[in-house]
Structures are given as C-alpha cells and as structure tokens.
Amino acid sequence: MNSIDKAMPVAVATAHRKRKKAGVPSYLIYETLNGRPLYYRNYKAVLDGQKKPAEIMGSSSLQAMLVSLIHGFLFMHINRKRYLLVTNESGIHIDKNTNLSNDIAIFDKADNLTLTNKYFDTAPKIAIEVDVRIEPEEFEGKESGYVHEKTERLLSFGVETVIWITTQPRKIFVATQQQPWLTQNWDANVPVLDEVILNLAALLAEEGIEF
C-alpha cells in the first residue's frame, strides 16, 4: 500500500486556518493531524443548534462495547509487568502539529514512560482504534483517507502495529512498519503482541453478543 503524502497544499492549509478563525470552537476538535484540525462527526449540527456537544462527543453503544471487550481481553492476557495498557481515548502528542488519540494503546514500560496530566509523548507499541469519530470532510468525505493518514503518522512516530476495527463493514485493518497492510474479517486471528492473538468474532461469541 502506498504511503499517504503528509504534505498539505498551501491553499488547503489557508482554508483550514480561515475556517478555524471563523468561529468553530476548539472543543469540537477531536484531533489535529499534520497541521489540520479534525472535528467530531456531526459538529456542524452543533454549530447549527440542532445538537448539543455531548450528543456527538460520546461513544456509540457499539463502539463502547467493543472497546471495553477488547480492553478486558488484553488486560487478562498481556504481560502487565512489562506493558502498560490504557484506554479512554488516550492522547498522543507527536509534535506541535499533530495530537492524536487511541481507543486502546499498549506501551512498553521499558520506554521510560512518565505519567503526567499531559498527553503521552512516547509511541505505544500497539494502537487500536474502533470506527472513525471525525467528520471526514478533510479527506473528501472518505473515512479511508483519514484511516490511512493517521495510521502512517502513528507508524512513522514509532508505533509497531496499528489495528483498526470497523463495524460497517465488519473488518479489521492491520498495519505494521515492515509488513504489507492487511484487511481481514472479524473472524481472523490477529496477532497483537508476543503470543497474544485476538479473534474478535470468537470473543463476541464467548460473551454471547450477536449482531
């Protein structure tokens, strides 16, 4: 798979700055990626007074369930003496132009982690995302553009594996620094780290959860 070009044309960058100055509140920014603000999905409904901010910022019931289930599975199976497992959209500060979040992240404790009231500035070994939370207008309305660019940025920062889980369609997208990127079904056996293998379909079946 080809790398996503990280450069943003000057005209596009100028348009982003103008729109930000036009009055979109900073609390509607979900992430900043390569110098551009990315807004929560349906943020325009908030600006138009059709929705309240809390209505677009929370996780859906499906996303919340999947994040909780995967986090619980990893909590039981990874070596927690060696790794730090975090969730709750943990912030990752890459540089002044890029601040991202992860639904689940696994850090190596040997990387001299310092826990503060600020974002992590160390790359996790594993980053796991469930669905897309931003309005994809910055990527010509295509979620795949966002997924690919964010994945490239995380990998270039030092993340070893990025795992995206999508509910529509039900796919698992796995990207690593060295191997070809793969898109698989939920019943695939996905290596996470060490000997830990995630099979999302089997995990859901064990919990008696059906779609």
Image: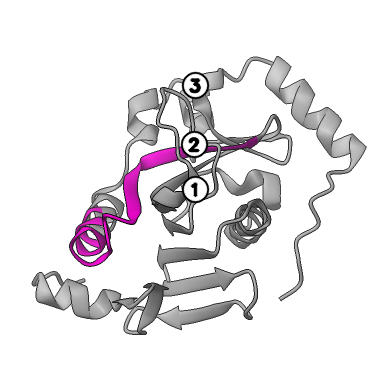
Residue range highlighted in magenta: 68-94
Nearer to the camera, 2 or 158: 158
In the picture, measured across the screen, residue 202 lies left or right of residue 27, that is left
In the picture, measured across the screen, residue 20 lies left or right of residue 174, that is right
Disc number for residue 111: 1
x and y percent of residue 107 in the render?
42, 51
- Looking at the rendered image, the disc whose residue lies closer to the viewer, 3 or 2, is 2
Going from the N terminus, do you reach mark 3 or mark 1 first? Answer: 3
* As drawn, 145 above or below 136: below
Provide the residue designation for mark 2. Answer: 120
Determine which quarter of the picture holds residue 78.
Answer: bottom left
In the picture, measured across the screen, residue 153 lies left or right of residue 109, that is right
Asked whether the beta carbons under mark 1 and mark 2 sit within 8 Å of each other, the answer is no
Going from the N terminus, do you reach mark 3 or mark 2 first? Answer: 3
Q: Amino acid at mark 1?
A: Asp
Provide the residue designation for mark 3. Answer: 27
* As drawn, 53 above or below 65: above
